[in-house]
Image: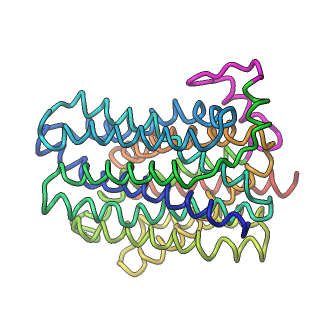
Amino acid sequence: MKKNRATLFIIFLTVFIDLLGFGIMIPLLPAFSIEKLYLSESMIGFIAGVYSLAQFVFSGFWGSLSDRYGRRPVLIASLAGSMLAYILLSLVFSGLILSTALLIIARAFAGSFAANISAAQAAISDITKPEERSKGIALISAAFALGFVFGPAIGGILSENFGFGFPIYASAMLSLIATVLCYFLFKETLPEEIRLTNRRSNVKRKILDVKLISDTLKNKNFGKYILIYTAGVFSFSNIFGTFQLFAGRKEGLAYNQSEIGLIFSFMGICNALVQIFLIRYFTKQIGEQNSLILGCFLSVFGLGLIGFSPTTMILMIVIAVLAVGNGLSNTVSVSLLSQHVSKDKQGTVLGVNQSLGSLARFFGPVWGGMVYQWVGYKYPFVTGGLIMLAVTVYAYQKIRRD
């Protein structure tokens, strides 16, 4: 792994810059949609989810394409596509074209080109040994976490001082920088002979290959890891539709928007620390399989106790537990998945995994919002914890007893 540090650094930097641009969008979309487009909360939720829906449809396709033509061209194409999507968004956010339809199209366009994660994971699988895979995959998770920490803060500050359009221009510039870095510095990681073999195969690639998804999930060697990852993403995504409502309750913690943002930043910092330091410790001490089960188990309490946190101190402890659990389970499940997939199918299978994760990120907030409204403010978190309890039992049975 040491000789591939330069490649790993470029992968980390590329994903971080791209995710930083994505994070910048987080605080802008709701405020702009209400103030300038006069949209309802349900429409705002739909527009936010369009990105993940498009990602679900296209991730498997781009992953398969990376198996045939290499990781480098897919990474470059996805980053360039993100830049073009931000340019379209800038027309809306700058006020040049105040169009809800264009906003939806631009978000869907961005999601359809969000292929860099599965391709980056496949690239890491190409250059790392199985026993080093968790450390490599953790780099991408750390890039995610750091983008989540800094992106929303940067977006909020820039929009407050320079208007809604300026942060979008900044996001487009960041994607351009990532594209240039990838083009000039990233070296192809998938051997030419594997690419040629895959291109000569008669397998047809579809945009949304339902049979491929079904066959992948049914695979006895690695299907379980995809199910664990998808269920974990769904459970964790509940908080993005409900945590702000819970934390802002006047009869509860009564946080303002700034304080809620700091809580999310704290969560991102904890997750980054898990990826940088704790993944290596846990996988070395108890092994990857046990680390995955531990991560699922910790997520039960990290999610389930959010609604029962009466003070800031207790809430911070619960969120730290959630960050450790979620960071462990997500990263190690992807690592174990990649270790059970042949080298020529890494992009395809990891693409399916990311695609299902995107679908989970769409339905998680929808589920959380419905439960919050119809059952009670504690229950999105309670149901998320219960799902993770079921996942923990499933992981124990499937992994420890196989």
Residue 210 vertical position relative to residue 354 in the rendered view, above or below: above
Q: Position of residue 304 (x, y in %)?
A: 51, 62
Q: Residue at x 50, y 61 (%)?
A: 13
| Residue 217 shows up from this direction | yes
Colour pattern? rainbow
The residue stretch that appears in magenta: 200-224
Q: Position of residue 172 (x, y in %)?
A: 32, 48
Would you identify the image quadrant in which residue 327 lies? Answer: bottom right
Q: Position of residue 312 (x, y in %)?
A: 35, 78
Q: Nearer the viewer, residue 370 or 236?
A: 236
The mark tally for this picture is 0
Instruction: Spot the residue most to the bottom.
Output: 313
Q: Nearer the viewer, residue 390 or 207?
A: 207
Position of the N terminus by quadrant: bottom right
Would you identify the image quadrant in which residue 198 lies? Answer: top right
Instruction: Spot the residue most to the right.
Output: 402
| Residue 383 shows up from this direction | no
Residue 295 vertical position relative to residue 231 in the rendered view, above or below: below
Q: Residue at x 31, y 59 (%)?
A: 244
Residue 286 vertical position relative to residue 60 in the rendered view, above or below: below
Left or right relative to 140: residue 313: left
Q: Nearer the viewer, residue 264 or 134?
A: 134
Left or right relative to 300: residue 167: left
Left or right relative to 244: residue 81: right
